């Protein structure tokens, strides 16, 4: 099987770092949602 | 609609078909037609993935859901970013390196032909029928709200999409999705902006959010451990994770989008792009619905959002009953408006209690109207999908109405185009090229691919044209999809996570997994988001047990 073309990993240099950033961002968004729903408008 | 609205709408429709035909030229082989020559960039693929997922009914129905039930529906997407990471680590490299056209093709490489055939057939059956619903639902809403012919709307929406997908294949799908997604995002921000400006004039945005909060509509994080309660944090995180893994990992309409990436990196980035944007997008759509809810405190809402049913009620209900429920509804609305203004002025606990009591009274008054409709027509009545289009038509300035109708068309067409294309791919690659014409030339393959695209487009139109008569059969189709989504994910999990699982284990595990989900659905009140978890776990357990009992398959190269 031929190996497909690979681009260099962007932004953070490695995939685990990128996945870590996505997970942290997802948690931040969830925290924002919780904050928004409880904020005393 | 005014002539300016018509102009805006027609410019969109003619423009998108012309653009789809222009970008889709130059297809020579089925690699070009189905995978856009495997040369797409991550942002284009990412927007296409998003556009395929957001149908018109997501756009109109989610705002209606925000109006009726608030923002708790957002949790359904909480599992999505985690699902994208899992997919980037697991299935995307396997699919990409195997150079497959369909997700199911990979299962033949890993297991055997029957497993590939069964999973592809399940995709064709469920997606083929549900694409008709994707076309029917917005057409019905638009025909009711705008007075257009339902059949003409179906044929206009379906026909224009068939034209450019049949000619340009996946290249047209992805590039038109990019434009359509831009239009949808613009429409979301526009509608939110207009809702905010309406509220700011009459009540103030902070008061509006406090009012929505008092009714529980800003509540997102329900930590109840109940499995039967809809949209809890846990069902969103766990059930949503499995739902998104199934949809983005095993549904050809999505897999085909990211297989078009020019490299594995581009394919991965396209999914991670969705991980960033999807939750904020749903947040804005739901928030728009919540603000429309507040807006209708100070503007009289119609007795029913579906004006065709309202006209039927006015013709068929006893006049004295109708006059009674109408007077009660109008009085309850006026009382709630007064209570809301008092709430905004003081925010005292007494004002909050008085407002909530007035809101409950209006809900009861509306319940009486709905009961009268159901008594008159003999059918259950729901109008969540009509709330937002009614708001658009009645409250937006000239020109904007045409633009938002174009947004609804864009959302529908972007989903339809991806589905027509993926259905044609599965038919061509998983069946026609295996069982009918294995070694035909490029010209023949390309022609057959275009004909399959046309077939599935026309099939969707035919289903949509008959959908009003099919009634509950449509609901059965939608439920059928949720029965096997998780089970198919289980087969892929067996393929990728358990190198020793046998083809026999995968095939029979899938059948027993679907049966298990059917039993759980029939005998318990577990919410549907959990079906995907049940299906996946069941297939893994059955598959491994069957492998252990009947022997281990020889590992195959992948």
Image (tube, rainbow, N blue to C red):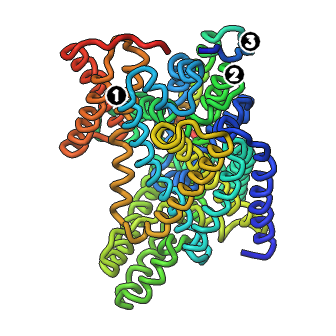
Mark 3 lies on residue: A8
Q: How far apart are the alpha carbons under marks 3 and 1?
A: 34 Å
How far across and how far down the image is residue B285, in percent? 60, 48
Quarter of the image that includes the N terminus of chain B? bottom right
Mark 2 Cα shell of 10 Å, populated few (<14), some (14-19), many (≥20) = many
Mark 1 lies on residue: B536
How far across and how far down the image is residue B33, in percent? 67, 41
Chain to which mark 3 belongs: A
Callouts 1 and 2 in the same chain: yes
- Residue at the (37%, 43%) spot, across then down: B482
Mark 2 lies on residue: B263
**Residue B428 located left or right of residue B313:** right
Residue nearest the viewer, comparing B446 with B14: B446
Q: Is residue B258 above or below residue B52?
A: above
* N-term mark: 1 or 2: 2
**Residue B520 located left or right of residue B483:** left
Q: How far apart are the alpha carbons under marks 2 and 3?
A: 10 Å
**Residue B17 located left or right of residue B50:** right
Assign a secondary structure to mark 3. loop
Assign a secondary structure to mark 1. helix
Which numbered marker is on residue B265?
none
- Residue at the (54%, 60%) spot, across then down: B135
How far across and how far down the image is residue B86, in percent? 51, 20
Chain to which mark 2 belongs: B
Asked if disc 1 and disc 2 are in contact, CB closer than 8 Å, the reply is no
Q: How far apart are the alpha carbons under marks 1 and 2?
A: 29 Å
How far across and how far down the image is residue B250, in percent? 47, 32
């Amino acid at each position: 099987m031929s190996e497909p073309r690979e681009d260099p990993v962007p932004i953070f240099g490695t995939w685990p770092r990128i996945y870590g950033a996505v997970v942290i961002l997802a948690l931040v968004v969830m925290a924002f949602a919780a904050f928004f729903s409880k904020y005393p408008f | 609609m005014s002539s300016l609205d018509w102009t805006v709408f027609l410019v969109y429709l003619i423009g998108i078909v012309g653009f789809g035909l222009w970008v889709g030229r130059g297809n020579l082989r089925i690699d070009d037609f189905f995978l856009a020559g495997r040369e797409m960039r991550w942002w284009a693929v990412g927007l296409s993935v998003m556009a395929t997922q957001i149908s018109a009914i997501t756009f109109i129905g989610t705002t209606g859901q925000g109006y009726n039930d608030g923002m708790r529906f957002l949790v359904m997407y909480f599992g999505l970013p985690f699902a994208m990471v899992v997919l980037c680590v697991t299935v995307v490299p396997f699919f990409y390196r195997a150079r497959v056209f369909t997700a199911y093709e990979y299962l033949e490489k890993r297991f055997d032909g029957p497993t590939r055939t069964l999973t592809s057939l399940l995709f064709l059956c469920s997606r083929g029928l549900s694409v008709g619903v994707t076309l029917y639902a917005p057409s019905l809403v638009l025909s009711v709200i705008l007075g257009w012919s339902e059949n003409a709307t179906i044929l206009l929406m379906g026909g224009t999409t068939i034209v450019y997908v049949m000619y340009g294949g996946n290249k047209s799908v992805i590039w038109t999705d990019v434009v359509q997604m831009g239009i949808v995002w613009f429409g979301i921000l526009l509608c939110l902006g207009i809702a905010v400006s309406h509220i700011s004039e009459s009540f103030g945005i902070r008061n509006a959010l406090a009012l929505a909060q008092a009714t529980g509509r800003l509540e997102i994080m329900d930590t109840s451990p109940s499995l039967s309660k809809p949209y809890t944090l846990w069902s969103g995180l766990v059930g949503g994770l499995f739902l998104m893994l199934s949809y983005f990992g095993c549904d050809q309409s999505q897999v085909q989008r990211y297989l078009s990436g020019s490299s594995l990196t581009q394919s991965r980035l396209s999914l991670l792009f969705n991980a960033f944007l999807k939750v904020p997008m749903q947040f804005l759509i739901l928030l728009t619905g919540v603000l429309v809810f507040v807006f209708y405190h100070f503007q009289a809402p119609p007795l029913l959002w579906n004006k065709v049913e309202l006209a039927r009620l006015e013709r068929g209900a006893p006049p004295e009953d109708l006059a009674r429920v109408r007077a009660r509804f109008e009085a309850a609305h006026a009382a709630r408006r007064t209570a809301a203004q008092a709430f905004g002025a003081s925010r005292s606990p007494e004002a909050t209690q008085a407002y909530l009591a007035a809101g409950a009274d209006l809900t009861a008054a509306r319940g009486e109207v709905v009961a009268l409709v159901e008594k008159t027509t003999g059918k259950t009545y729901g109008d969540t999908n009509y709330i937002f289009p009614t708001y658009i038509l009645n409250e937006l300035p000239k020109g904007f109405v045409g633009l938002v109708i174009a947004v609804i068309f864009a959302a529908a067409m972007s989903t339809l185009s991806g589905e027509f294309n993926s259905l044609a791919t599965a038919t061509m690659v998983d069946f026609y090229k295996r069982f009918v014409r294995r070694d035909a030339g490029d010209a023949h393959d390309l022609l057959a691919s275009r004909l399959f695209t046309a077939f599935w487009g026309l099939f969707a139109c035919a289903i949509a044209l008959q959908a009003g008569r099919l009634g509950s059969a449509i609901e059965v189709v939608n439920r059928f999809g949720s029965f096997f989504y998780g089970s198919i994910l289980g087969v892929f999990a067996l393929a990728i996570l358990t190198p020793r699982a046998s083809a026999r284990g995968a095939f029979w595990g899938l059948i027993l997994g679907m049966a298990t989900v059917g039993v759980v659905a029939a005998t318990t009140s577990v919410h549907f988001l959990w079906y995907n978890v049940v299906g996946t776990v069941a297939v893994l357990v059955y598959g491994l047990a069957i492998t252990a009992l009947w022997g281990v398959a020889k590992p195959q190269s992948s």
